[in-house]
Amino acid sequence: MEQTKTATRDYPSLSNAPWGLWDTLYARRSNRKYLPGEIDREILGRLEEMVRTAVSVRGADEGSLVLVSDKAVVERLKQRLHKGMQGKINLWLNRSPLEGFLALVLPKEDVRSGRPQMLPLAAMAAEDVILWLTEAGLGTCWLGALNQREVREALGLGKDMFVSAAISFGRPKPRVKAMDMDHMMYRRISRKRKPLAEIACLETIDRHYTEAQFAQRSFSASGTQDIAGLLGRLSENRDSSGDVPLDLALDACFEAARIAPSAGNTQKWHFVAVCEEDARRKLAEACGIENAWRAAIVAVGDVDTGFLYEKMEKPFWMIDLPIALSQMSLMAASMDLAVDVEIRGIDEKAISALTGLRPPLRAVGVMGIR
Ligand SMILES: Cc1cc2nc3c(=O)[nH]c(=O)nc-3n(C[C@H](O)[C@H](O)[C@H](O)COP(=O)(O)O)c2cc1C
């Protein structure tokens, strides 16, 4: 698999055992060019299973992540998704022989509420499936710029439902240097990521993370590195095992979040690690967890209603940050850490006070390390 982003450090070399999840995370990129030809039926069957697993592990609502693989519906969705101003940037779909879509289908009232509850869990599950597709050698692309009415009709949904995003998938066309949309988007937008110091903080939002000088520089990554296996590990009620030092673990989780995809690659996010004892206890309390975690990372979205957010009427912070939480939690599992990902029902006010968040910054979720 080709590495599509520049890594902060050579993470795999820090492990004595193969740390394969990095290959999948760095190989995932938005594919806007696909090859004709059908995907193996067996893979499609496993994909259905994978969607069910991810929805269940993330506690998402059944039906909030829909797999569209019926040829006629795929074609209809492809043609209608980019109609009008809203979907213009996705005209490339016209020339793409896709295999299917995943669609985030939520009640309109959830998406439009001040703090969507169902949307973030569906988004996390979607990113899990995207990484599974990457591992299977398939290409994917998140699509947030879509024509709501057309997509709703193409999927036969009622007016009370809202499609927050769709994800295309198919056989990826190898990247070549050319003056096309795929290459242009890749070069201009997609490859770039903010450095860790800009997005990661320690204890509070005003204390920037400086790259760790690890006291112990090696450990053994988990024997499980595939996405399905890691999701299985996340669903087990267990304690952390393995020998990963906490500073290295936090650094790896920050990096997993840093390279995640975000709408328009805006990366309007921060990740605050909470390690001090009193703060850890209070944070767990604010998430309704009884025992304090060994450490936790608060995922923070910048909800500044810029052009992109306003015009599209979408709470992208409730998609982007869950995507990062998916990647961070899989990374934790790849180091044999047991984590809780808390989004629903957290006391946002208490977490903001604890980590010094002020508008437009909002706590989306917390990943606590047991
Ligand atoms: C919620 C969301 C919506 C997105 N919408 C679109 C879209 O409508 N069209 C598109 O071509 N790319 C879209 N993207 C892809 C991003 O532009 C891409 O993830 C980002 O530039 C980073 O590039 P990478 O995915 O190749 O790492 C979207 C990504 C996310 C997470």
Image: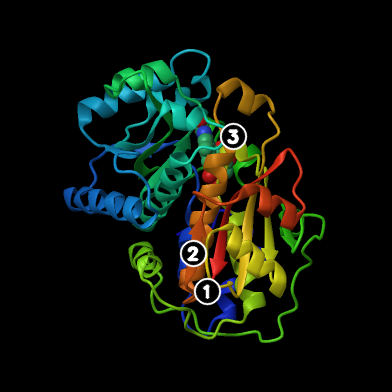
Q: Is residue 81 above or below residue 303?
A: above
Residue assigned mark 1: 370
Can residue 327 be seen here? The reply is yes
The kind of secondary structure element at disc 1 is loop
Which residue is at a point 81% across and 60% down the rendered structure image?
Answer: 207
Identity, as a three-letter code, of the amino acid under mark 3: Met
In this rendering, would 38 be left or right of 139? left
Q: Residue 277 in the image: state x and y as whole percent.
A: 70, 74
Q: Disc 3 to disc 1, how far (Cα)?
A: 43 Å
Q: Are marks 3 and 1 in contact (CB under 8 Å)?
A: no
Q: Would you say the beta carbon of the disc 3 residue lies within 8 angstroms of ligand 1?
A: no
Identity, as a three-letter code, of the amino acid under mark 2: Asp
Q: Nearer the viewer, residue 62 or 168?
A: 62
Q: Nearer the viewer, residue 2 or 285?
A: 285
Residue assigned mark 3: 184
In primary-sequence order, the first of circles 3 and 1 is: 3
Residue 70, quarter of picture: top left
Q: Are marks 2 and 3 in contact (CB under 8 Å)?
A: no
